Image (cartoon, helix red, strand yellow):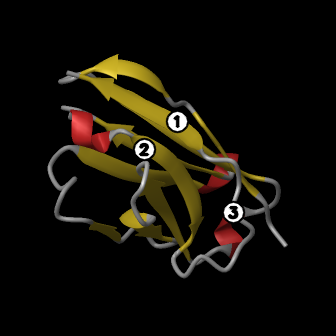
């Protein structure tokens, strides 16, 4: 089974930007839809964005116009560019396939200060 590892989180002020990476241990092309999820303290994990192998993207309403998901199949990596960050974007961010069928990784912490 392909393993996914998240990186790129950090502390940023509101209005700032971060780029997260989701690197696969094998061919990321084997995963039809790669998705980003996030979990804030005390809340359920929620879907953020997904990208199909052909490039079609879907975003949660809360991040539309601010976040961009992209995949580089040659580098076996999916990225999440996050702009205009808000304090409510603070969460641990995870990547998985669209249905969460792969093992969940440790995620990467994103903290947005006001």
Are the residues flagged by discs 2 and 1 in contact, CB closer than 8 Å?
yes
- Name the residue located 71 percent from the left edge and 54 percent from the top edge: 105
Disc ID at residue 104: 3
Q: Mark 1 points at which residue?
A: 109
Are the residues flagged by discs 3 and 2 in contact, CB closer than 8 Å?
no
Q: In which quarter of the image is residue 86?
A: top left
- Name the residue located 57 percent from the left edge and 39 percent from the top edge: 108
Report how far apart the C-alphas of labels 3 and 1 lie in the structure.
14 Å
Q: In which quarter of the image is residue 3?
A: bottom right
30 left or right of 95 in image: right
- Name the residue located 18 percent from the left edge and 24 percent from the top edge: 15
Q: Tell me the crowding category of disc 2: few under 14, some 14 to 19, or many 20 or more residues within 10 angstroms, Cα based.
A: many
Report how far apart the C-alphas of labels 2 and 1 lie in the structure.
6 Å
Between 27 and 107, which is closer to the camera in this rendering? 107
Q: Quadrant of the N terminus?
A: bottom right
Classify mark 3: helix, strand or loop.
loop
75 left or right of 97 in image: right
Disc ID at residue 91: 2
Q: Along the polypeptide, which appears first: circle 3 or circle 1?
A: 3
Residue 59 image offset from top left, x and y in percent: 27, 64
Disc ID at residue 65: none
Between 102 and 43, which is closer to the camera in this rendering? 43
């Amino acid at each position: 089974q392909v393993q996914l590892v998240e990186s790129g989180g950090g502390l940023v002020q509101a209005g700032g930007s971060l780029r997260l990476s989701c690197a696969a241990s094998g061919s990321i092309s084997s995963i039809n839809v790669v998705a980003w999820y996030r979990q804030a303290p005390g809340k359920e994990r929620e879907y953020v964005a997904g990208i199909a192998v052909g490039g079609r993207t879907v975003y949660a309403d809360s991040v539309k116009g601010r976040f961009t998901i992209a995949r580089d199949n040659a580098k076996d990596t999916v990225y999440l560019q996050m702009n205009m960050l808000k304090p409510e974007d603070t969460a641990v961010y995870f990547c998985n396939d669209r249905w969460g069928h792969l093992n969940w990784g440790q995620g990467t912490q994103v903290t947005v200060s006001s």
